[in-house]
Image: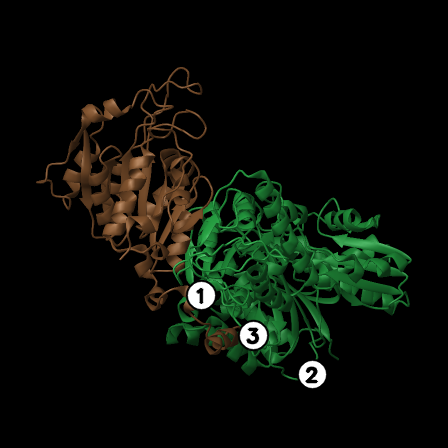
Chain colours: A brown, B green
Amino acid sequence: MASLEDYGEFETAWCPGCGNFSIIKALKQALVKSGLAPHQVLLVSGIGQAAKMPHYLRCNCFNGLHGRALPAATGARLANPELKIIVESGDGCSYGEGGNHFLAGLRRNIDVTMLVHDNQVYGLTKGQASPTSGEGFVTKAQPQGAYSKPFNPLAAAVGQRISFVARGFAAEADHLAGLIAEALTVRGLALIDILQPCVSFNKVNTFAWYKERVYHIDPAHDASDWQAAMKLAQEFGERIPLGVFWRGGRMAFSDHFPVLQAGPLARQGTDYAALNEIMRKFV
Amino acid sequence: MSRDEINILIGGEAGQGLATVGQGLATVLVRTGYHLVVTQDYQSRIRGGHNTFALRASVKPIQAPREGVDLLVALNQETLTLHEKELNPGAGVVADAGLTCGLAPCYNVPYAQLSGPRYLNTVALGVSSSLLGLDREAVADGLAKFLGKLSPEMAAKNQEALAAAYAHAAANPAPFTPLAPPAAAADRLLMTGNEAIALGALAAGLKLLAFYPMTPATSVALTVIAHAREMGVVTEQAEDEISAINMALGAAYAGAPALVPTSGGGFALMVEGISLAGMTETPVVIVLAQRPGPATGLPTRTEQGDLEFALHAGHGEFPRALLAPGSVEDCFHLAYHAMHLAEKHQSPVILLTDQFLADSYRAVAPFDLSGLAPVKAGGAEAGGAEAGGDYERYAITSKGISPRALPGLGRALVVSDSDEHTADGHITEDLSARAAMVDKRLRKLAGLTAEVLAPIWEGPEEAGTILVGWGSTRGAVSEAAGALRAQGRSVAACHFRQPWPLRPDQFLSRLARAGQVVMVEGNATGQMARLIRSETGLHISRQVLRYDGLPITPEFILRALGA
């Protein structure tokens, strides 16, 4: 049985007070609770402060390009159906630079767990508006305030009926750990958008701002009720729901490939007799 | 009277089915035992426009397309108007009853009287085959084979149309010299460069293919997809080329030999991914089927304009290999080689072809699959799956190649990072570690260089003139050199099938000793000549360049040389 110690303890490059500290704590708790050993887990990330997560955790890790974590994770999933794959990155990487991949990932229902550290700002590049920044959010790059409407990732995900859609809050690590643990059991894409204050660059959506607004979704909410999930997903402002919005029953993307039932592709051979027959058809 | 060789041009609008006539005829010719080189020239549209399908068939081995037409099969008047001037002496023209051929000898066929409008292609095929002197039974067999599974009614109608065409030709003999019978009905396959690449990659144990459709690369993917279930390959049409290469890298990291076919514009989108392959030392093979640029350029035409782009694509410095097949056989063998090379050297390998070769059907001997082996990811070089908890993905080694373990297949934790990293794969800003990692990665170039495929030479060792080419122009260069030798001139041909890395010991002294060296390239600025100069100092000032979107032919080279 894996323990918290197996996942290690590392010095980080994060600001003191950053929400990432409790997210990593929640992630480790969830991994241990799920009975996963580090060598069974693959963390795939892009670029940004959140995307440094794999460096602070003992497990397999592919820290790729900004915005491209989901395609890399998709490739790894399609190569090895046995790995537990977690995609972890920020709102800019996941919804901005990687926006097209996010939409395609939702359509595929690719079977990975996607954790998005959503602090509504670019941290690594020091404070520009992100795809989830509120309208009018003032930065040095948007001195008149952000003109664009914020992206609603949860509504997009519920809209595509992926397998699991939830929202967590960095300040509620135990609750978040529970969400992650459930997400790790899901077949198909599990998205958890995680509200996370940025102490250095987001002076609007602060810990106190979130604390005043968040509430736990009523246990009576039926997460298989699509209309109800969609309605909840619209709610972001004076009140912000936390918890599981939607549990769908869509087929996981990798289940479309019979070859994956035989396990990792690296362990599978090449049938030269079959290839010879194929070649012989070119006449 | 018969001829050993013939050049057939079929022309018409997109949507008229000229490719059906062409592919049907190609199938019949190859099954009968002829050698074949096909050039497809089409416009980027689904209907209308002017398209041609050219078949050069011969009783002897041939390597390149030829200019001049011996048999013109015109599906519309425009074809006659455009190609009349290309007719060779003694040429024949097959055209519908209403079309006029000007000065050319016209063999008008009343298509409408011989069959229904849906079988016009079959009638054209039948009349052409009859003029070529091909046995009707063989054509009927070839047609059945080419058309594949049809309803019995459709199959019968096609055979009726074929019989009507042969009967018409017998009743109305034309003064046309037929093809000599082939030397022997040899065991040959008919396939394009793209199809051969797909088979070569499958032979190397390809396990994942990701792509975004782009002419002229798409048929590499389509060929793999057609056989993916039988061969245990996972394929995915990605949302864009950026996704395609990142998917391939994720899969390759996890142990699946991966391939991404594309053309120039899509390759441009993949550039950051190529850099990631360099940094994470992840094997991947990219097929770059070139077409004329910049930007969208001429989407369905050919060019060799992306050599320097492929060589330099990706920010930062890291080793790579470029392979450039010169024939359909080469497409198979170099695709196989590329997959192994990428894994062995944990580096990106780019296979450079172009529209001409990608779409060119050839008669090829079946590939010998005995002795081939699939790529073993994290193979012999790696402690691989056996590595333990202290495994270091980027262990510093004398050759630069670190043992590659695969995530999830053992206890080893495999950490790959796009940031500069320490030996364990984790992010670092230790600048001495940075320099050591750069050196380690670049040391792999020596290993790649040791395995460079030597240029292929033809003709005299001490030549008055050497014609140099790379990639798809091999056949044209070889035949042009042969034609010059037949005139009594001392001319050799030198074909680069691996433009990078270069090994001057394989070519420099021989080139330097020649009376003159001529570079033949399908681009406007002589990119390979520039590369040879920058690597060796040898300046090849005489260049035969083509960049109008058409393939280089032997005649084009001979005209440029004034020969």
Which callout, 3 or 1, points to the residue nearer the camera?
A: 1
Looking at the image, tell me whether mark 1 or mark 2 is earlier in sequence order.
Answer: 2
Per the model, the C-alpha gap separating discs 2 and 3 is 31 Å
Chain at tag 2: B
Return the residue nearer the eye: B460 or B28: B460
Asked which secondary structure carries label 3, the reply is loop
Res. B439 mark = none
Where in the figure is residue B461, as x and y percent of width and height?
Answer: 86, 67
Q: Disc 1 marks which amino acid? A: Glu
Q: Do labels 3 and 1 share a chain?
A: yes
Residue tagged 3: B372
Looking at the image, tell me whether mark 2 or mark 3 is earlier in sequence order.
Answer: 2
Q: Disc 2 marks which amino acid? A: Ala
Asked which secondary structure carries label 1, the reply is helix
Looking at the image, tell me whether mark 3 or mark 1 is earlier in sequence order.
Answer: 3
Where in the figure is residue B138, as x and y percent of width and height?
Answer: 56, 81
Where in the figure is residue B118, as x and y percent of width and height?
Answer: 45, 64
Left or right: residue B473 versus residue A173 is: right
Q: Is residue B66 visible to the viewer in this orientation of the structure?
A: no
Residue at 30% across, 20% down: A204
Q: Quadrant of residue B100?
A: bottom right
Q: Disc 3 marks which amino acid? A: Leu
Residue tagged 2: B183
